[in-house]
Image: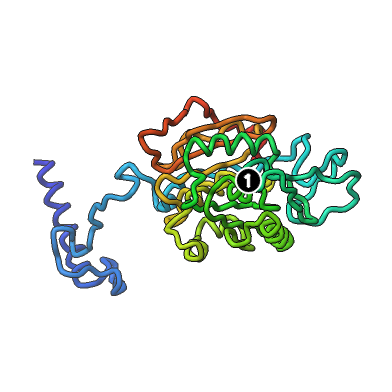
């Protein structure tokens, strides 16, 4: 009886409150603002006030919250390399300590930079000019090893197109032209470097097979449409990425390559030059760029990826390892 009396009294006290709410009034006599008053009653209305319907959010579906609503990047940010006690891009032999930013003019060099030559193909032995700015081109032995690998992938064809980014003097792209690739596009942010590439193309007899774009590599990866129209292709067959080690975040850079919708044709090969301080790039970038080779040459490592490789190409994930964050900026 005592419990029944409690429920009766509770019901009598709730009913007037509901009546006030239905009339748009607070039980204390204060009007409820119109935007807080409920509309027609339905199954989600209690005492004239709308109750929120349960909606599956990203968090409730096992995803992330609103703060993480943006999709996860295909390749996560790594961080830039800290300064390491090694010769860096912009140094020359005997000029240790003269670390400079790529693309800036050099001063007070104590010796001349090493000569750059084409190592194979129709222009073998041709000496390439280098711009009067700091850069560290791919070493000759590394370049020979790279093109030995590329021949395995049958990408040095006359119907294929190469995109040489962070081109410097154009050494890698000109090597590709010399060894049989049909066309090449060179991208560098330094105007002086771009002028030097044009001179080197003419010097090697490739003036009609290559053209130069003054731009950042990131922009070239994100929006390659103008370059592709120029070469009349739907995507590049070979992309070389040879950045200054300490000036880029490889994770951010590679994410732009992986997420670009126009950059690569099916079966395209992507070459990434990176330093041993990074440890190893992953054996897969995104869902479709598969690691085929990962070879070390002194301080330099070359990672070779293929977009949806054919059944006749065998990936070698055992050559890859784990990223090392020891030398990355925190």
Which residue carries the number 1 mark? 242
- SS at circle 1: loop
List x then y, in percent, for residue 166: 64, 52
Mark 1, residues whose alpha carbon is within 10 Å: few (<14), some, or many (≥20)?
Answer: many
Quadrant hosting residue 19: bottom left
Quadrant hosting residue 289: top left
Residue 75 or residue 108, whichever sits in front: 108
List x then y, in percent, for residue 168: 69, 52
Number of labelled discs?
1
List x then y, in percent, for residue 227: 52, 63
Considering every residue shown, the one lying at the far front of the view is: 122
List x then y, in percent, for residue 248: 64, 48
Residue 144 or residue 107, whichever sits in front: 144
Q: Residue at x 80, y 43 (%)?
A: 114
Q: Residue at x 62, y 47 (%)?
A: 122
Question: From the image, which quarter does the N terminus lie in?
Answer: top left
Question: From the image, which quarter does the C terminus lie in?
Answer: top right
Q: Residue at x 62, y 29 (%)?
A: 296
Quadrant hosting residue 139: top right
Q: Residue at x 42, y 30 (%)?
A: 314
Question: Relative to residue 111, is residue 33 depicted above or below?
Answer: below
Considering every residue shown, the one lying at the far top of the view is: 318
Question: Relative to residue 21, is residue 138 depicted above or below?
Answer: above
Residue 159 or residue 130, whichever sits in front: 159
- Classify residue 16 as left or right of residue 75: left
- Classify residue 293 as left or right of residue 110: left
């Amino acid at each position: 009886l005592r419990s029944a009396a409690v429920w009766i009294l509770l019901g009598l006290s709730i009913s007037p409150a509901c009546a006030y709410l239905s009339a748009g009034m607070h039980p204390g006599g204060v009007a409820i603002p119109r935007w807080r008053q409920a509309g027609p009653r339905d199954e989600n209305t209690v005492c004239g006030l709308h109750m929120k319907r349960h909606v599956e959010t990203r968090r409730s579906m096992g995803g992330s919250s609103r703060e993480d609503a943006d999709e996860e990047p295909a390749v996560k940010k790594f961080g830039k390399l800290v300064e390491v006690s090694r010769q860096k891009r912009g140094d020359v032999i005997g000029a240790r300590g003269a670390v400079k930013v790529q693309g800036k003019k050099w001063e007070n060099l104590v010796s001349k930079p090493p000569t750059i030559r084409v190592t194979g193909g129709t222009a073998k032995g041709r000496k390439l000019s280098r711009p009067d700015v700091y850069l560290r081109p791919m070493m000759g032995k590394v370049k020979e090893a790279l093109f030995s690998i590329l021949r395995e992938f049958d990408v040095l064809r006359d119907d294929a197109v190469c995109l040489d980014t962070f081109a410097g003097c154009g050494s890698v792209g000109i090597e590709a032209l010399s060894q049989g690739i049909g066309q090449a596009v060179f991208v560098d942010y330094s105007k002086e470097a771009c002028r030097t590439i044009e001179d080197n193309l003419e010097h090697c007899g490739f003036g009609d097979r290559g053209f130069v774009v003054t731009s950042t590599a990131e922009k070239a990866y994100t929006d390659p449409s103008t370059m592709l129209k120029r070469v009349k292709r739907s995507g590049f067959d070979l992309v070389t990425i040879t950045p200054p080690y300490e000036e880029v975040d490889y994770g951010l850079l590679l994410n732009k390559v992986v997420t670009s919708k126009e950059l690569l044709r099916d079966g395209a090969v992507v070459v990434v030059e990176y330093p041993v301080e990074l440890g190893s790039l992953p054996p897969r970038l995104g869902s479709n760029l598969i690691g085929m080779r990962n070879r070390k040459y002194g301080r330099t490592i070359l990672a070779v990826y293929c977009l949806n490789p054919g059944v006749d190409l065998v990936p070698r994930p055992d050559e890859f390892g784990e990223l090392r964050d020891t030398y990355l900026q925190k």
